[in-house]
Amino acid sequence: AQSVTQLDSQVPVFEEAPVELRCNYSSSVSVYLFWYVQYPNQGLQLLLKYLSGSTLVKGINGFEAEFNKSQTSFHLRKPSVHISDTAEYFCAVSEGDAGNKLTFGGGTRVLVKP
Amino acid sequence: SAVISQKPSRDICQRGTSLTIQCQVDSQVTMMFWYRQQPGQSLTLIATANQGSEATYESGFVIDKFPISRPNLTFSTLTVSNMSPEDSSIYLCSAEEVSYGYTFGSGTRLTVV
């Protein structure tokens, strides 16, 4: 069965500094990988996804992530954060074939300080 | 990507009552999913809803407590039955689009008093 581990539950970071959110997964088959953001009192918004092809994936709001199959990781990065990036970030995995459920990591709360 | 309209956005309910949450998708989708997000926690899948068949429930969730309907390819409902304060959570529906991934509704914030 698939599982997702987000190694940091909270990441404080100063405005304009870089941030990296770590995500590791376990699965016995090929996977699709996703990062979602949840702003306070809102639903989930897709930041980016890896389905196939290039392992470096660029998403919205300046975020990018790299799929590393050998390390089973899909870390999310942003070179310079803004106050508005304060939110909860979720890594999620589905096991490839259409119709498979998403499994979520525990989430990482990013707090951007001025 | 598809757009999902979920309602109600929030509700406060008395214990022992039931609430039905609706999700309408603006395009036809094969798979829909229902998640629960307890306060300060991640998302946990409740069940997968296919049109024309019984929903498939995850471990720890049962049909009597969380009945689901999926009458067509654009609509689904989740009922939270015989509610207790422990059911206070955010409930989210999701739809899978093969070439896009998964889209989520804006969630229903349920408080049981």
Image (tube, rainbow, N blue to C red):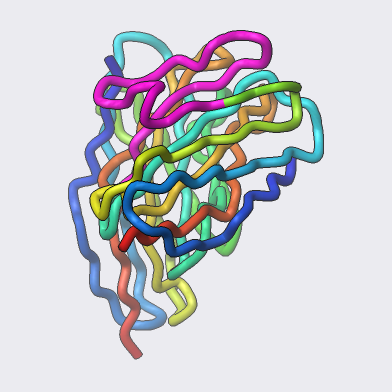
Q: Position of residue B24 (x, y in %)?
A: 72, 40
Drawn side of residue B44 relative to residue A48, left or right: left
Which residue is at the front of the view, B12 or A32? B12
Furthest toward the bottom, the residue is A114
- Point out the residue furthest to the front here: B16
Q: Which residue is drawn at 34% across and 21% down?
A: B58
Residue B89 appears left or right of B2: left
User: Image point 57% across, 60% down: which residue?
Assistant: B9
Q: Nearer the viewer, residue A104 or B51?
A: B51
- At a point 45% along the width and 32% down the height, the residue shown is A33
Nearer to the camera, A31 or B31: B31
Residue closer to the observer: A85 or A102 = A102
Is residue B49 one of those drawn in magenta? yes
Tell me residue A13's x, y (percent): 28, 75
* Figure check: B69 above or below B38: above
Q: In which quarter of the image is the N terminus of chain B?
A: top right
Q: Measured along the vertical axis of the image, is residue A95 above or below residue B65?
A: above
Q: Where is residue B44 in the image (x, y as percent from the top left)?
A: 34, 37
**Is-magenta flag for residue B79?**
no
Q: Position of residue B3 (x, y in %)?
A: 73, 46
How many numbered marks have been drawn onto this rendered protein structure? 0
Q: Which residues are drawn in magenta? A: B42-68
Residue A24 picture quarter: top left
